[in-house]
Amino acid sequence: MIKPRQARLSRATAAVPAAPVRMLHLGLGNFFRAHQAWYTQHAPDAADWGIAAFTGRRRHLADALRPQDGLYTLVNRGPRGDEIEVIGSVVAVHEAGDHGAWLRHFRSPRLAVVTMTVTEAGYQYDPGSPDIAALRQDPAAPVSSAPGRLLGGLMARDRAGLDPVAIVPCDNLPANGDRISQVLRDMAGQVGPEAARAVDRAAAFVNTAVDRITPRAGDADARTALAATGLRDAAPVVTEPFSQWVLAGKFPAGRPRWEDAGAAFTDDVAPFARRKLWLLNGGHSLLAYLGGIRGHHTVDQAVQDPVCRAWLEQWWAEAAEQLAAPHDEVAHYRAALVDRFANPRLRHRLDQIAADGSQKLTVRILPVLRAGPVAARRPRAAVQVLAAWVCHLRGRGAPVDDPYAQATDAGGPVAAAVPRLLRLLDPGLGQDPDVVAQVARQVEAIEQQNPR
């Protein structure tokens, strides 16, 4: 087919057929499109597995992708060049508020898998959520939280008498399937017996570990996609060559053959999740805060800075001591991370990583800090990351986008700021005088070495 020059990307212009919807995704964003949608496209049975994707909160991606029939260009950005492909596994796109469409998909006998990327904040359970009262009064009532939407969908499916679906969370949380299962059961307990039965009968929960760096795309990436395909794409995705997906759990209604696209299935994803959370995500957080304070804007710039690199290596060494994995395997992963972080063509922005640190550090940094055998031997690098985060909230480095920013007096004394912020992060941590003292000393040192 001859493509009209600079026509918009669509199934007609790209000659990409749509598969039937058998998967549902919550949290339409760049990582999902570089990861779960990519694995589904590369499964040998992809023609049987279309995805209907819903935005989490904002509608801009739905507005961009709907005229493109869900298609987008994936720019796989290696150190020496790009590999570009059009991804067609997303066949329907909905905005967050289209609750009627959400319930219709759950009532479909074809539906087999529900994936989600809603960030760490999406797993927060609020016993006072208005979704509870809404679902108690009407199971089909519009709801807004991720747990509320999942519970409403499961209740709709159970009422329709359909077989259970697999719930597959793909966020950076340990035991993410177990976590969302418990959140849903807690919420269902408040909604009523029908909701509790729906969680038991309509869902199976899968734990996962996910790994692929996906920076925010820009105008230059859209031009790259246009030059490669001849088609205008309003929502291209940039990612790195490396990708990993490890899953553990049952899929009662089937799933794509993701293992043939490189995914791994195991009985326990915990070792993979901890390695990724502590080494990659923890390393990213360290570089985001310290690198921003030292004037860097991207991960590759920060990792080339000898001071940032020294902190990073120390963090990795201390975190690796707590990993139940062979030394050679961890060493290989660390070496690969250096190459991934140093890729200058990805331009992974530090401010993107720094956002919402208060939601991320609890799973990326605090487990290693707590593993310190005694207060005097707390992992030094973990203390350094917390101190750099406090400095970030106090106005140093990348622009602040964090729920705890309002609790921070940027010009106030360090001795008052540190315990207050650590208590918000973890009540026990903020009441530990040794940790508070160590973090405060490090904050003062960073701020003295990096004046405004």
Image (tube, helix red, strand yellow):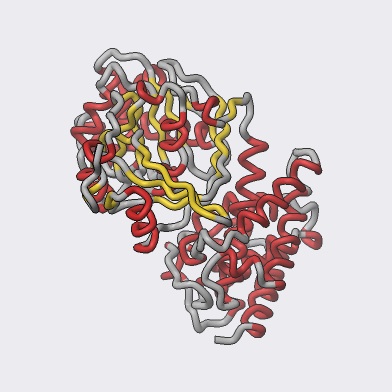
**Which of the two residues, 257 or 233, is positioned nearer the viewer here?**
233
**Which of the two residues, 427 or 368, is positioned nearer the viewer here?**
368
Residue 356 locus on image (x, y percent): 46, 59
**Residue 223 in view:** yes
- Residue 51 occupies quadrant: top left
**Residue 322 in view:** no
Relative to residue 422, is residue 98 depicted above or below? above
- Residue 46 occupies quadrant: top left
Horizontal side of 153 relative to 417 (left or right) equals: left
Quadrant in the picture for the C terminus: bottom right
Residue 185 locus on image (x, y percent): 42, 29
Relative to residue 351, is residue 90 depicted above or below? above
- How many labels sit on residues? 0
Residue 251 locus on image (x, y percent): 46, 19
Relative to residue 200, is residue 225 depicted above or below? below
Horizontal side of 329 relative to 156 (left or right) equals: right
**Which of the two residues, 14 or 183, is positioned nearer the viewer here?**
14
Which residue is pictured at 61% across the width and 69% down the height? 302
- Residue 244 occupies quadrant: top right
Residue at the extreme front:
2
Relative to residue 121, is residue 54 depicted above or below? above
Which residue is pictured at 53% across the width and 46% down the height? 212
Quadrant in the picture for the N terminus: top left
Which residue is pictured at 35% across the width and 55% down the height? 227
Residue 405 locus on image (x, y percent): 44, 69
Which residue is pictured at 35% across the width and 28% down the height? 23
Horizontal side of 451 relative to 2 (left or right) equals: right
